[in-house]
Amino acid sequence: MKLFDVYPVNNIIIEKALGSHVWDEKGTQYLDLYGGHAVISIGHTHPHYVKRLTDQLHKVGFYSNSVKMPLQEQLATLLGKVSGKEDYQLFLCNSGAEANENALKLASFYNGKKKIIAFKKAFHGRTSLAVAVTDNPKIVAPVNETDNVVFLPWEDEAALEQAFQQYEVSSVIIEGIQGVGGINVASESFLRKIRTLCDTHNAVFIADSVQCGYGRSGKFYSHDFAGVNADIYTMAKGMGNGFPIGAIIIAPKIQPVYGMLGTTFGGNHLACAAALAVLEVIQEEKLIENAASVGAYLMEQLRTFDKVKEVRGRGLMIGIDLPDELAHVKKELLFKHKIFTGEAKPNVIRLLPSLALTKAHADEFLDAFSKELNK
Ligand code: PMP
C-alpha cells in the first residue's frame, strides 16, 4: 500500500529530539521554532514527561471510562488551578477538532438554538461541525455544508451586532489568536463585545484555544487578555506535548447531562499522565511567564526590521508578515540555517516554539533571519 500524501513534506527525517532541538538521521541539529505545529509546549522529550508516561505505561496503559479514574480527577484539579478556571467542568477527548465539535454541539443542547457565528480565516478542525465553521471551502465536503453557520468579517462589531439581531444565535466560536489564518490577534474590545452580546442573547461564547491556549500567548488562555470568561474553552495541541489529547472546559451555567458527551479513548491513563506532566512542568519551570518575556523580546526585535511588513502575535505565537520578494526566507531558514518555522498564507512565517524557548535561541533565530533579510 502507498501512503496518501496528506501534507507536503520536506524529506527531513527526525530521529532525535530534546528541548528546543531536533536531529535528523545524519545527526544534523535543527532549532525547532515550529514545535510540531504548536504541539510541543514543554520541549521535546522532557525528562519528567518521559518518566511520568513510562511509569504509567508500566502500571496501566488503558482501561475504559467505565471505571473510576483518579488521574482524570487530578488533571481536572490541576488544570483548574493552573488556568484559574476552577469552577468549570472538564471533558476529555482526543483532538482539537473533537473538542470544537463537542463544544458547538453542547452549546446547541444548552440553548436549543442552531445558528453559529464564526469568522473569516478561522480554522477549527476537520470533523463535521468543526469544518463547517472553518473558512476554507476546499476542505468542506457537501455533506458537511450547513446553513447554520454565519461567517463574519474579523473584528467587525457592527456586523456582529447585526447578526445577533438577525439570527437566533446558539454560539460564537473564535480563536483568541487566529493561527492557520495568519496570526491575527483578537482585540480585547472585540472579545468583550462578544461576551456582552452572548449574555444578552443567551448564546454560548466558545474560545478555541487549541493553538493559542495552554500558556502560548503568555497567559493560560489568550482570551484572558480581554478580562472576560468564555463559556466553553477548547484545547488540544500543547496539552499533551505530543501525546494526543483534547479537552473542553465548561462554565457552571452549562450542565451537560449523561449521554451528551463521550468517547472511547478520551482521558485514558496515558493521555492523563502526559497532560499532568505538562502542567507540572509548566508550573515548575514558569513556562507561561517565559513565553511572555521571550515572546515580547522576539517581537520587539522583529519589529526593528524595515523589510518586514508586520509582526503580529502574543507570547510565543508570532506571525512575521513578509513582502512577496522575501517569500523564500522560510526555506533558507530551514535548509541553510537549520531552523524549523511554520507558515501561513500568503507570506507569513509562523513561530510556535516550545514555551521553554530561551533568549539565546531567540537570538540565534534573529541572527539567521537578519542575514537572510539583508542579503
Ligand atoms: N482549532 C485550531 C485553532 C487549530 O489550529 C487546529 C489545528 N490546526 C484545530 C482546531 C484542530 O485540531 P486537531 O488537528 O487536533 O483536530
Image: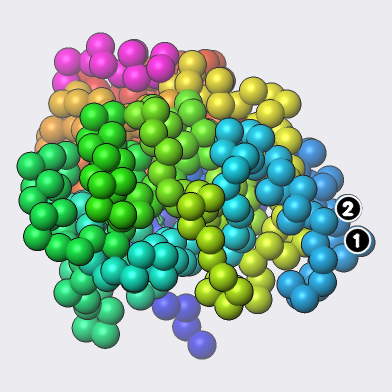
Residue 55: image tag: 2
Display coloring: rainbow
Judge from the rendering whether residue 310 lies leftward or rightward of residue 72; answer left or right: left
**Magenta stretch holds residue 299:** yes
- Which SS class for mark 2? helix
Task: Identify the image quadrant of residue 49.
Answer: top right
Task: Identify the image quadrant of residue 374.
Answer: top left
Tell which residue pokes out farthest to the right in this image.
59
List x then y, in percent, for residue 153: 12, 48
- Which SS class for mark 1? helix
- Relative to 341, does residue 150 appear above or below in the rendering? below
Q: Mark 2: few, some, or many residues within 10 Å (few <14, many ≥20)? A: some
Residue drawn 92% across the image and 61% down it: 59
Q: Which residues are magenta?
A: 296-307
Q: Mark 1: few, some, or many residues within 10 Å (few <14, many ≥20)? A: few
User: Quick check: marks 2 and 1 in contact, CB under 8 Å?
Assistant: yes
Amino acid type assigned to the residue bearing label 2 in the image: Asp
List x then y, in percent, for residue 292: 48, 21
Judge from the rendering whether residue 183 lies leftward or rightward of residue 258; answer left or right: left
Q: Is residue 301 visible?
A: yes
- Relative to 263, does residue 92 appear above or below in the rendering? above
Residue drawn 23% across the image and 66% down it: 115
Q: Quadrant of ligand 1?
A: bottom left
List x then y, in percent, for residue 40: 57, 43
The residue that disc 1 covers is 58
**Magenta stretch holds residue 288:** no
List x then y, in percent, for residue 32: 51, 37
